[in-house]
Amino acid sequence: MDNNRIKIAIQKSGRLTEHTISLLKKCGLIISHTRNHLIGYGENMPFDLMFVRDDDIPGLVQDNLCTLGIVGMNEALEKKIEIENLEKAPANFEIVSNLDFGQCKLSFAYPDDSTYQDLKNLEGKTVATSYPNIVSDYISKAGLNISVTQFSGAVELAPSLGKADLICDLVSSGQTLKAHNLTEGQTILESTAVVIKSLQAMDSIEETWVNKLIERIQGVLQVKESKYIMMHAPRASIDSITNLLPGTESPTIIPLEGTNETVALHVVCKENVFWETLEDLKAKGASSILVVPVEKMLM
Ligand code: PRT
Ligand code: ZN
């Protein structure tokens, strides 16, 4: 491996893999990767991808073996708290971007038929989780007296196996809890995939590339909902029309041939635009309204 190349740790095979690769491709990275290989090479930028288990991603960035990682916030936070508890020093990585995939919640869940269904009546009970550091941190900050037992898989079986009174696990649709006769309670973390970055000093070339990639990732995220809107509008209504459009910056105003009262108005709208908004624009005097998707954006 070439040590001058910047390593990004990503999940080898799982819920985040496809979204992560698609995001990096949208950032312009051409990846050469053969199935079952643990390394993918960036053909047009000095980035190489390390395909690993998601649990290992924060540790690789912590140890500066990879500069960047894309992982669930749940894993990043679990490792961060673990390191900070063990080493009594801040972790060596930070979250630099929240992504728009991998959404889930880390929530407590109680057996459907239990007499306790909220955190108040849990004195002396035991919670099973794969996230012992996040859960212990939450419990101690909330001043609760609940023991935490670590389960690395099938956490939802812990109550029926008699290993715990309740669980704290990732939930998305809620089907897994339902299938195991568990009721969701308090959520302690709303998680998405995130980009983590090593806090180790970098040379200026590496730093430039890393910042460029993070900026492109943010550009890709912004573009998703953004629309470019063009219309004809009465000059007198420019303010009231732009107020109707969420997330816009100063509009571009272009004079129209043969009239002073009407202008062409172009704006980038950073949120989705619904039919209702177009109808409201029309009611304010706008006409010939065109909404087009934005392909790339660099702020
Ligand atoms: O092999 P490797 O260790 O890399 O993968 P993994 O099996 O540990 O992770 P994977 O691919 O399942 O999840 C990767 C990341 O996706 C997690 O760390 C979360 O950040 C995110 N994510 C999003 C989820 C879920 N949704 C999710 N629903 N991770 C796990 N689940 C599990 C949950 O643990 C429970 O068993 O799905 C079940 C609940 O789902 P519902 O839909 O029934 O509620
Ligand atoms: Zn894992």
Image (cartoon, grey):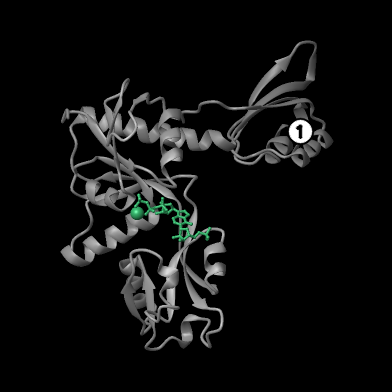
Residue at position x 47%, y 49% from top? 102
Q: Nearer the viewer, residue 229 or 124?
A: 124
The answer to whether residue 174 of the structure is visible from this angle is no
Query: Where's residue 217, x and y in %?
Result: 42, 35
Q: Secondary structure at mark 1?
A: helix
The residue tagged 1 is: 237
Q: Nearer the viewer, residue 210 or 256?
A: 210
The amino acid beneath tag 1 is Ser
Query: Where's residue 257, x and y in %?
Result: 76, 11
Where ligand 2 lies, by image quadrant?
bottom left
Q: Is residue 1 left or right of residue 44?
A: left
Q: Is residue 249 left or right of residue 275?
A: left
Q: Is residue 177 left or right of residue 37?
A: right
Query: Where's residue 35, x and y in %?
Result: 34, 32
Residue at position x 57%, y 69% from top? 178
- Depicted 281 relative to depicted 172: above or below: above
